[in-house]
Image (cartoon, coloured by chain):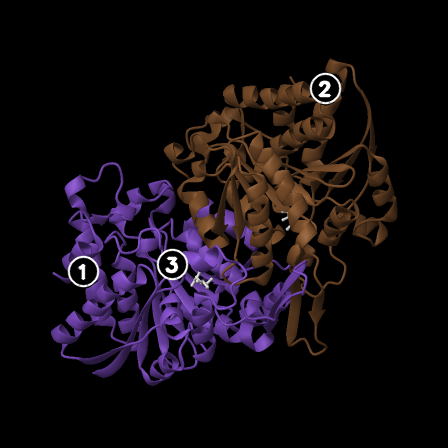
Chain colours: A brown, B purple
Amino acid sequence: MKKNILIIPGDGIGQEVTIWGKQALEAIAVKYNHEFAFDEAIMGHTAIEAKGNPLPDETLEKAKASDAILFGAIGHAKYDNDPSAKIRPEQGLLKIRKELGLYANLRPILLFDELLDASSLKPEVLRGTDILFFRELTGDVYFGEKKRNEDNTFASDLMNYHRYEVERIARKAYEAARTRGKKLCSVDKANVLETSRLWREVVQELAKEYSDVETEHMFIDNAAMQLVKNPKKFDVVLTANLFGDILTDEASQIAGSMGMLASASIGDSTGFFEPIHGSAHDIAGQNKANPLASILSAALLLDIAFGLQEEAKTVTTAVADTLKAGWRTGDIANADTPADKILGTNEMGAKVLE
Amino acid sequence: MKKNILIIPGDGIGQEVTIWGKQALEAIAVKYNHEFAFDEAIMGHTAIEAKGNPLPDETLEKAKASDAILFGAIGHAKYDNDPSAKIRPEQGLLKIRKELGLYANLRPILLFDELLDASSLKPEVLRGTDILFFRELTGDVYFGEKKRNEDNTFASDLMNYHRYEVERIARKAYEAARTRGKKLCSVDKANVLETSRLWREVVQELAKEYSDVETEHMFIDNAAMQLVKNPKKFDVVLTANLFGDILTDEASQIAGSMGMLASASIGDSTGFFEPIHGSAHDIAGQNKANPLASILSAALLLDIAFGLQEEAKTVTTAVADTLKAGWRTGDIANADTPADKILGTNEMGAKVLE
Ligand SMILES: CC(C)[C@H](C(=O)O)[C@@H](O)C(=O)O
Ligand SMILES: CC(C)[C@H](C(=O)O)[C@@H](O)C(=O)O
């Protein structure tokens, strides 16, 4: 198979971990005789520094021309502490999602048995959990009109959804549910929000069409609670952009750490694959970040963008084997982990490649 | 002390549990020689059925005339399944919050040692947790303009904040932090939302004024994760209406169950006290609901509305003693709880009053 892959390391630890996702792809190409051509581009704070623009035209063109994109992370403390900054790294990520029509963000909560003890949740609560989140990614309060009045006494963001936006992601979630546990939980706040009521109406209609899938509707506050109380009860979870952002980060504790979770953003064209963790500037450049989420993002890329299931499995198995052999990065270690089993980013990446 | 207390049981299990909050207040009146005069009013589904209005004028008048309000819960499955219903129970709750100017919702996460095992989180993660949430309650996307276009293809909700709305609740949160661990964590989504950026600016300004309190800013997705990962790190948490709704329900798992958490809504006039749990129609009328959140709401009422600290303590201690004696409702029982220690709503309420 011949494919063009664009690597966008982005900011902070994105720079350190994405190298390992790329190396995993290279190793797969060699092993299975594929031709992967790699290109690289900048985005976020890195791109603001270099070009004054969080998503330079060149990056967007390269993205559109590629067959799949492996991304790192975005963000920088500088902007977080300056709420009035007009140009911000995150704008780059939001714009590329919109421009590529990446409306469906898939976040599988993959639980490695070896990491049952790394979580703050009890092992018996976790064991057997297998959730696939479908987070809507190009609508909601993320993209609605933003206002600030002149004297800085008022600010607003418009939360909004079109029926077609809800329908297309709901269909994808239902299709996935059919191939899994045949259960779909749609999360909204229909007792308060008009957008949620539209959301619920659309899902109710589709529920009839997908009557082989069991549909449940849950309020976001309840879902945030149930996810900690009894994560096993969920199969496919379908939700809006903002709620999905919150729930999937929360759910990372099920997998032991944010450093373990990969995501796939798909839609109209090129697929976009990234860890769900952020740029973590507090540990950036220290060889401490967990590269497994980037490596698992590469596995998702192989599976979803190229349909290479066996290759994807090889990557996931390599990660599982490394964990089985006892190797850990700091974020997934616990009090019982021997000090000599705790690795830096590069050592962990190398172990998986072995 | 002579006081008028309005009881609004509301919907579902609100009807069953609020009786016990009221009885706790009556018992305190007898023990400490106070004169509490009680009145009752309807709200929510119950009021729609009786008067076609989720917040009848009479209820609002009684509320304004009282010295404090003890509320139960709101909501009914009928409306949840019918997203197009124009009149909804929750409108009653939102309207009374707005009309009474209840802009600050205090939700203490009180951890009883006896319930360490009832949580899905590990006891060592929980032990020592003591969080006080300040949730803004009369602004945000809850109250902004809602739109639906005629052909039902589009819906929107306006998320918005005025500077003064952020400032007044932030002040309350800072004042509380001063009397506690001197740490305040403000939760927002300033990397995406304009309202959050205004929020962060206001908190940054106040942080200078309250320089004896350590201020931290955290994104909502990260906060939802940290709350499960390491709840001990939080002291006072300050956040907007929607984010507070989500985080406090999530945090209920720290206390073992939603059935344990009380809240106080305060602002310009009469204080409003309620469990954070909902109407739970699935178990309503079955004598299964946990009355402790209502009893603890009564304790908050005594403390915050009337300044009766000792009386409040008496109620909290009665709850703690009941738990120490091993009594549980279903929601806070676990596999090791002997069957004869599991009580219904009424039996649990009676045990605490003893
Ligand atoms: C960086 C930020 C804009 C982004 C989001 O909120 O979507 C991130 O949290 C994510 O989940 O991908
Ligand atoms: C019933 C609902 C409108 C309410 C809210 O979202 O505020 C409830 O969840 C709460 O937390 O008090």
Residue A111: horizontal and vertical position, in percent?
Answer: 50, 30
Residue, disc 1: B318
Indicate the amino acid at tag 2.
Ile
Q: Residues within 10 Å of mark 2 (few under 14, many from 20)?
A: many
Point out the frontmost of discs 1 and 3: 3
User: Separation of disc 3 and disc 2 at Cα?
Assistant: 51 Å
> Mark 1 and mark 2, same subunit?
no
Label 2: which secondary element: helix
Disc 3 under 8 Å from ligand 2? The reply is yes
Label 3: which secondary element: loop
Point out the frontmost of discs 3 and 2: 3
> Mark 1 and mark 3, same subunit?
yes
State whether residue A223 appears in this view. yes
Q: Quadrant of residue A34?
A: top right
Q: Nearer the viewer, residue B304 or B56?
A: B56
Residue B308: horizontal and vertical position, in percent?
Answer: 25, 75
Residue B32: horizontal and vertical position, in percent?
Answer: 14, 75
Label 1: which secondary element: helix
With A3 as the anchor, is B205 left or right in this view? left
Indicate the amino acid at tag 1.
Ala
Residue at screen point 42% across, 56% down? B77
Residue A188: horizontal and vertical position, in percent?
Answer: 54, 53
Q: Nearer the viewer, residue B285 or A294?
A: B285
Q: Quadrant of residue B281?
A: bottom left
Determine contact: label 3, label 2, CB under 8 Å. no
Q: Which dot marks residue B278?
A: 3
With B73 as the anchor, is B27 left or right in this view? left
Residue at screen point 54% across, 68% down? B207
Q: Chain of mark 1?
A: B
Residue, disc 2: A28
Q: Chain of mark 3?
A: B
User: Separation of disc 1 and disc 2 at Cα?
Assistant: 64 Å
